[in-house]
Image (cartoon, rainbow, N blue to C red):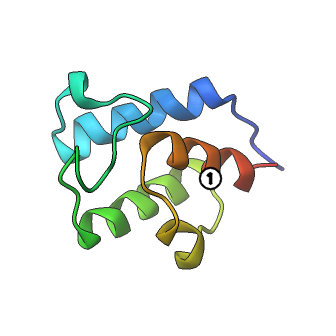
């Protein structure tokens, strides 16, 4: 069974994860926000986010794919692509 979410649903879930698990101010969470520069992520945070997204999608996210991700929009696009 393939769970299909819209990009808006992926964005909302990502936003909830960032607010609840990473205590990021909602005002900072915009599609063009850079995870590392704007949201002050480090590599451990990126791994934690990948794990949370795997729980959400029930899909394996390869580390190679996640290394290419820089912005909130990149995360949404990557998750959307994974679910295709």
Q: Quadrant of residue 10?
A: top right
Of the pair 22 and 65, the residue shown nearer to us: 65
Q: Position of residue 30 (x, y in %)?
A: 37, 28
Name the residue located 25 percent from the left edge and 71 percent from the top edge: 44
How many marks are shown on the rendered structure?
1
Kindly identify which residue carries mark 1: 78
- When the figure is inspected, residue 43 is found, relative to residue 73, above or below; the finding is below
From the viewer's perspective, tell me whether residue 46 is left or right of residue 53.
Answer: left
- When the figure is inspected, residue 51 is found, relative to residue 24, above or below; the finding is below
Label 1: how many Cα within 10 Å (few below 14, some 14–19, many 20+): some
Name the residue located 82 percent from the left edge and 49 percent from the top edge: 84
Of the pair 4 and 75, the residue shown nearer to us: 75
- When the figure is inspected, residue 4 is found, relative to residue 57, above or below; the finding is above
Name the residue located 37 percent from the left edge and 57 percent from the top edge: 49
Q: Position of residue 38 (x, y in %)?
A: 22, 44
Name the residue located 42 percent from the left edge and 55 percent from the top edge: 70
Helix, strand or loop at mark 1: helix
From the viewer's perspective, tell me whether residue 46 is left or right of residue 74.
Answer: left
């Amino acid at each position: 069974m393939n769970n299909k979410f819209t990009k808006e649903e992926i964005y909302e879930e990502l936003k909830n994860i960032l607010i609840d698990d990473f205590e990021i101010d909602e005002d900072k969470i915009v599609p063009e926000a850079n995870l590392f520069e704007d949201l002050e992520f480090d590599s451990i945070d990126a791994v934690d986010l990948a794990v949370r997204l795997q729980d959400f999608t029930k899909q394996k996210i390869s580390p190679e794919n996640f290394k290419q991700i820089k912005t909130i929009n990149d995360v949404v696009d990557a998750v959307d692509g994974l679910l295709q």
